[in-house]
Image (cartoon, rainbow, N blue to C red):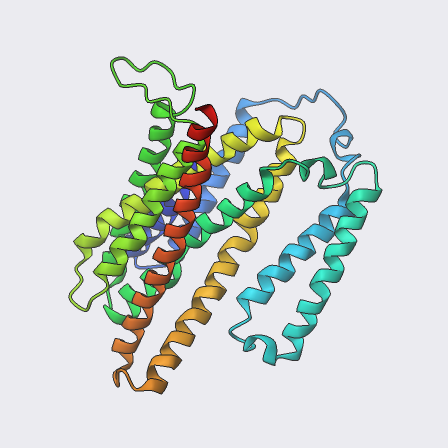
Amino acid sequence: MYIIILGAMPGSNWIARQLTIAFDSWQMMHWFMTGLMLIVVLVIYTCTHPWRMMPFRLPLVSLDWLGCLLWSVLMLQVIWLFTYGEYYNWSDSRVWRAVLVSFPILLVVCIGRMRRIRHPYIDPSVWPHARLIPILGMFFVAEVMNATPHALQNTLTGGMLHWGFTTTGQFYIFEILGYAFGCIFTILWGKGCPNWGRLPRLGFKYTQLLTVGFAALLMYQVLMYFYVAPTLNVERLWLPTFLRTFGYGIFFSTMTIYLKDLIGFPTFFMALTVSGFIRNGVGESVCTGLYSYGLRHQIADALSRGIHSDYVQVLMVAVKEMYGLMCLIGTLTLLLMFVFFIINPLLHNK
């Protein structure tokens, strides 16, 4: 399931590029998806029959629709703040400041409603778990590490190296392979893994798997820091792309299973929703906004000091400095994970 979920993201991009190249039209992906949806509808109407265990509206009666709306608006505020921060020049805009001021007010309203009603959209019993906040923090750091290809690598390959549509499409193949091998690694050598013939059963704990996955994410940042150069060829990015998706595949699948065992089934889906706020909601927009601001700051600083007169050189130096900053953040996070997940249990057992 995790291979399908993670592999579908680069897979759809690769199919879209191949259809665009083959038919010379960007609309072919839309026609392709329309055909797949029609096939799904045809299978449903021909291979299934209408049968329900309960009335249609019964599962939705107890849902907190107002709470769902409030949390959704809260997430949209965060997404808007970081998506349009560069456009409005952040706090220089009155509109941006107004949304920023309204965010804590709406957050207090959401928390108050969550604690007051009987069946809230997010149950308060999710938050007392001691390890939930560190898990959400690791989710956010992993998203920041995984977002560098969209903000930094694309700037390098498209804005400076001028690689074409077909050249950059090669990365999607290695992304699919990385996600697949990452999930398979979690299955084969994770906690409670099945007996797969003569393969060694390492039996990594969840925390050890998370450390391995994050180390692979960090290796991508380190390799890209040394690879940023005007003479970079496309073959050198195959390994970093594979390592990044390999680590994120381990991190994504292990973190979800770890969350299930930690929280328990009754509140697991609410905890999964909270983690989805970071992983699938605000994570990408926050990372894109921060990287855009960081690149603009580095470019302005280099131009003001007269380090380079050519804009392409300045942009390349800014990308390299951003990768170096991510290397430092990732190394510090990995050291913290190593101390709390590996050294601390060993000392405790001893």
Image quadrant in which the N terminus is located: top left
Residue 93 visible in the current orientation: yes
Residue 270, quarter of the rendered image: top right
Horizontal and vertical percent position of residue 168: 27, 57
- In the image, 210: left or right of 77? left
Work out whether 239 lies above or below 201.
Answer: below
Residue 327, quarter of the rendered image: bottom left
Write the residue at 54% across / 66% down: 83
Residue 45 visible in the current orientation: no
Work out whether 90 lies above or below 346.
Answer: below
- Marker count (numbered): 0
- In the image, 128: left or right of 16? right
Write the residue at 37% across / 22% down: 203
Horizontal and vertical percent position of residue 93: 62, 79
- In the image, 79: left or right of 319? right
Work out whether 92 lies above or below 80.
Answer: below
Horizontal and vertical percent position of residue 163: 24, 64
Write the residue at 57% across / 75% down: 90
- The residue closer to the viewer here, 310 or 328, is 328
Image quadrant in which the C terminus is located: top left
Write the residue at 55% across / 43% down: 134
Horizontal and vertical percent position of residue 304: 36, 86
